[in-house]
């Protein structure tokens, strides 16, 4: 039996009507998370923490999926990978598209591979706590301040590009600082970034259903910076 270590929020099935990306400077105070995942650890030094919010999430079309998420998460028991909705603001090499195998074959149900059109990997090792990253641009447009990406379970924003950017390489400052060590060839996902979070209010998924069919909850998350054992 394999135990689930986190849950992926269904990016397309249950998108927020209004999305607050929630990159909060550490000096802003309020609820924070320690490396153990506990709330209210005070003013831990750093370059910020993610506190995304889904406002008025329409769940009437996928009520069963929402109830299933509530059951699996069980308050703060299970981390949630919260998607970042960039609305097309990322360094595109090309638009995402479905592609077949090299011989034009598809899977048995007719589906194909999803090609994101943008491919970036870490170039040099960087230790946890570092706020600078060098990447190899295999297929990538110009990386700009404000672009958001994730590496593994953690999410970051580009603060500024520190050296002359080329078609094949870029070095930039990030916020928040790296939550874990990153290694050469680790994937840098600008297309579908997401961040490991916990619910701020553990009961928020237990909603009141209008006519037992519709609900529009506002869901607040806070980044869980603790390592995840797979």
Image (cartoon, helix red, strand yellow):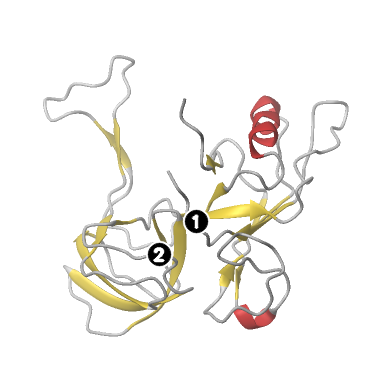
How packed mark 1 is, by other alpha carbons closer than 10 Å (few <14, some 14-19, many 20 or more), is few
**In-front residue for pair 230/14:** 230
Residue 6, compared with residue 162, is above or below; it is above
Q: In this rendering, would 101 be left or right of 41?
A: left
Judged from this view, the residue extending furthest toward the left is 103
- The residue that appears at 66% across and 29% down in the rendered structure is 68
**In-front residue for pair 87/170:** 170
Q: Quadrant of residue 213?
A: top right
- Element type at mark 1: loop
- Element type at mark 2: loop
**In-front residue for pair 63/37:** 37
Work out whether residue 170 can be spotted: yes
Residue 154, compared with residue 174, is above or below; it is above
- The residue that appears at 60% across and 78% down in the rendered structure is 44
Quadrant location of the C terminus in the rendered image: top left
Judged from this view, the residue extending furthest toward the top is 108
- Report which residue position mark 2 lands on: 180
- Report which residue position mark 1 lands on: 87
Q: x, y (%) of residue 9?
A: 56, 42
- The residue that appears at 72% across and 69% down in the rendered structure is 40
Of the two numbered discs 2 and 1 on the same chain, state the one appearing first in sequence: 1
Q: In this rendering, would 5 be left or right of 206?
A: left
């Amino acid at each position: 039996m394999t135990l689930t270590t986190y849950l992926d929020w269904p990016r397309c099935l249950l998108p927020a009507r209004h999305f607050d990306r929630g990159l909060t400077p550490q000096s802003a105070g309020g609820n924070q998370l320690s490396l153990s995942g506990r709330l209210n650890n005070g003013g831990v030094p750093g370059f910020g923490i993610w506190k995304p919010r889904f406002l008025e999430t329409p769940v009437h079309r996928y009520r069963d999926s929402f109830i299933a998420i509530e059951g699996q998460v069980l308050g703060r028991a299970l981390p949630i990978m919260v998607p970042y909705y960039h609305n097309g603001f990322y360094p595109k090499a090309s638009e995402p598209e479905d592609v077949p195998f090299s011989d034009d074959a598809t899977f048995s149900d007719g589906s194909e591979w999803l090609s994101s059109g943008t491919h970036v990997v870490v170039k040099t090792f960087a230790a946890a706590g570092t706020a600078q990253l060098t990447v190899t641009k295999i297929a990538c447009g110009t990386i700009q301040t404000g672009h958001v990406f994730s590496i593994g379970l953690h999410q970051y924003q580009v603060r500024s590009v520190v050296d002359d950017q080329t078609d094949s390489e870029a070095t930039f400052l990030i916020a928040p600082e790296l939550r874990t060590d990153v290694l050469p060839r680790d994937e840098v996902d600008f297309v579908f970034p997401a961040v490991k979070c916990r619910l701020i209010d553990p009961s928020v998924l237990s909603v009141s259903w209008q006519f037992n069919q519709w609900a529009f909850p506002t869901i607040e998350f806070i980044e869980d910076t603790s390592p995840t054992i797979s």
